[in-house]
Image (cartoon, rainbow, N blue to C red):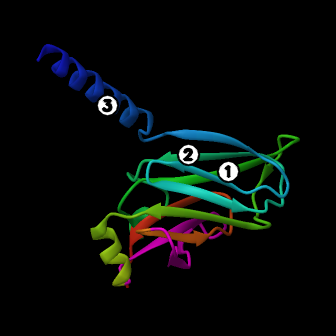
């Protein structure tokens, strides 16, 4: 009986630490070669590149859904994903060449909102300093996953859409 209880305590502790690791500012750095494909996922949010035009390091971070620039019209339903890229010389790359995506694995409730056109992925466009809707679609072959092709390296969020 004591051994079983000890196993449950260890298991609960491991789960708690894994949740802390994927906290509000979880970050992953990944090296990408030219022509490579990579998938970087943190929790239920991720980034995917197919046949990379660049070689360098991509930084994928989760950001809290709390106050963000221009969020007066954006109502995030989960954490946001921030995708940044530095080439092999350490220079920051801002515009996208190639096929890069961000994706969210949705809960059944979120999927219902998406199917009713009430949920979409948005990106922060720094030039006009505002959030813009990203063309979001359901990924075929993956349950409850939606994605959008990213147009800038930067901040993306899953949010309710209001007219």
Residue closer to the observer: 6 or 155? 6
Vertical position of residue 29 compared to residue 63: above or below: above
Image mark for residue 72: none
Name the residue rendered at 44%, 74% in the picture.
Answer: 120
Residue closest to the far right: 89
Q: Are marks 1 and 3 in contact (CB under 8 Å)?
A: no
Q: Nearer the viewer, mark 1 or mark 3?
A: 3
Name the residue rendered at 52%, 76% in the picture.
Answer: 140
Disc 3, SS: helix
Q: Is residue 57 left or right of residue 103?
A: right
Disc 1, SS: strand
| Quarter of the rendering occupied by the C terminus | bottom left
| Quarter of the rendering occupied by the N terminus | top left
Image mark for residue 16: 3
Label 3 CA crowd tier, 10 Å (few <14, some 14–19, many 20+): few
Residue 110: x percent and y percent? Answer: 32, 69
Disc 2, SS: strand
In this orientation, does residue 70 appear?
Answer: no
Image mark for residue 84: 1
Name the residue rendered at 83%, 40% in the picture.
Answer: 90
Name the residue rendered at 78%, 62% in the picture.
Answer: 51
Label 1 CA crowd tier, 10 Å (few <14, some 14–19, many 20+): some
As measured in the structure, the alpha-carbon distance from the residue carrying label 3 to the one carrying label 2 is 20 Å
Magenta stretch: give its range. 117-142
**Residue 135 magenta:** yes
Q: Which badge, 1 or 2, comes first in the chain's sequence?
A: 2
Residue located beneath label 2 in the image: 61
């Amino acid at each position: 009986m004591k051994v079983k209880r000890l196993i449950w305590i260890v298991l609960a502790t491991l789960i708690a630490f894994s949740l802390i690791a994927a906290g509000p500012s979880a970050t992953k750095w990944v090296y990408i070669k030219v022509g490579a494909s990579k998938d970087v996922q943190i929790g239920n949010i991720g980034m995917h590149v197919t046949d990379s035009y660049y070689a360098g390091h991509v930084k994928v971070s989760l950001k809290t859904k709390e106050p963000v620039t221009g969020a007066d019209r954006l109502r995030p339903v989960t954490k946001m994903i921030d995708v940044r890229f530095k080439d092999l010389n350490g220079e920051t790359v801002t515009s996208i060449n190639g096929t890069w995506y961000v994706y969210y694995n949705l809960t059944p409730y979120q999927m219902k909102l998406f199917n009713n056109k009430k949920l979409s992925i948005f990106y922060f466009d720094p030039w006009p300093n505002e959030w813009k809707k990203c063309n979001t679609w359901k990924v075929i072959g993956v349950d409850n996953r939606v994605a959008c092709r990213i147009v800038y390296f930067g901040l993306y969020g899953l949010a309710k859409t209001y007219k």
